[in-house]
Image (cartoon, rainbow, N blue to C red):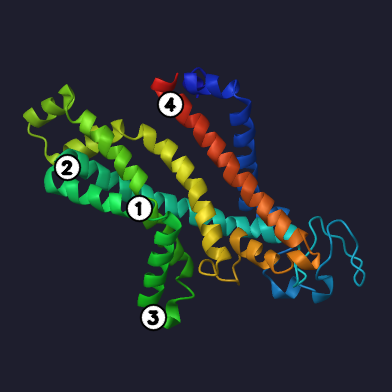
Amino acid sequence: MRRFLQSDLFYSFRYSPVAIVSFVIIVFIILTAIFADLIAPNNPFDPASLNLMNGFTPPMQANDFTGETFLMGTDDQGRDLFSTILYGLRISLFVGVMAVMLAMLLGVMLGLVAGFVGGWIDSFIMRFADIQMTFPSILVAMLIYGVAKGILPPEVRYEMSIAVLIMSIGLSEWVPFARTVRGSTLVEKEKEYIIAAKMVGLSRYQIMIRHILPNVLSPVLVIATITFALAIIAEATLSFLGVGVPTTKPSLGTLIRIGQDFLFSGEWWILFFPAVTLLAFALSINLFGDWLRDTLNPKLK
């Protein structure tokens, strides 16, 4: 801990207001989602706690029928919007984290193999990555989602919807990891310690995992940070389009889609608060990722 406090990374963090504010917002949102059971006034997904008479209650105004007041108002079903956003954040964060882990695992392994082995394997992996990069990632995710849902039996599609969504986003975001790791691997494999490892008889697998992999992970952290924001936005976009999280387990994207239906009828808060939460979270992650990239890249110092 003391070593970290004396590091250049922490020194740069202390004197970067943007990084500090972004980090505080990220931590605050994550903690509120994790402890939603303790913070939220009620469970919006518990039918027993809902009262349709509370529907369309404006923020900080007493309901005409029940007299109850809600911090961010309620939606058409009488659900407390503040509680709904907290529980929706849980789903968005879970999908984002798992999708980034899948993309990182797949991209790092493929990039490591492509850079170290080379030959036709390298050409095949990189040409496939080039082809995928010609399409917007959201379209790739929608294609994978549609194919996976079509393959699954109808009786398990609902239960597997979140898993399919994670797989769709993860498989659409692996390319930046693979290209970055491949480039770093091409540099590392020509260094003296790798030549020495080959001379003592270590296998390709041992060299890649024990020696090269730890030395190519620095840029992966930055890419993972930025990809996390992209995964959150992709999940929200897919849910907004109705092909993501089921409506019974709404995420931020689902809440935004629901709020759009009532935007022009005067119930602006149903759309506004989920959209602002998504914007603040994604923007904070991107700003923090940019700072992390500039700090860890010695060429930018």
Q: Secondary structure at mark 1?
A: loop
| Residues tagged 1 and 3 counted as in contact (Cβ below 8 A) | no
Query: What amino acid is labelled 3 in the image?
Result: Pro
User: What crowding class fits label 3: few (fewer than 14 Cα within 10 Å), some (14-19), or many (20 or more)?
Assistant: few
Instruction: Please report whichever mark, 1 or 2, sits nearer to the chain's N-terminal start.
Output: 1
Image-based side of 83 in relation to 34, left or right: right
Instruction: Please report whichever mark, 4 or 2, sits nearer to the chain's N-terminal start.
Output: 2
Instruction: Please report whichever mark, 2 or 3, sits nearer to the chain's N-terminal start.
Output: 3
**Residue at position x 74%, y 62% from top?**
270
Q: Given this view, does label 2 or label 3 mark the residue nearer the observer?
A: 3
Instruction: Please report whichever mark, 4 or 1, sits nearer to the chain's N-terminal start.
Output: 1
**Residue at position x 15%, y 42% from top?**
118
Q: Given this view, does label 1 or label 3 mark the residue nearer the observer?
A: 1
Residue 134, numbered label: 1
Instruction: Please report whichever mark, 1 or 3, sits nearer to the chain's N-terminal start.
Output: 1
User: What crowding class fits label 1: few (fewer than 14 Cα within 10 Å), some (14-19), or many (20 or more)?
Assistant: few
Give the total of numbered labels: 4
Q: Report the Cα–Cα distance between label 2 and label 3.
A: 38 Å
Residue on which disc 2 sits: 205
Q: Is residue 26 above or below residue 242?
A: above
Residue on which disc 4 sits: 296
Residue on which disc 3 sits: 153
Q: Report the Cα–Cα distance between label 4 and label 2.
A: 28 Å
Q: Is residue 292 above or below residue 170?
A: above
The answer to whether any part of residue 55 appears in the image is yes
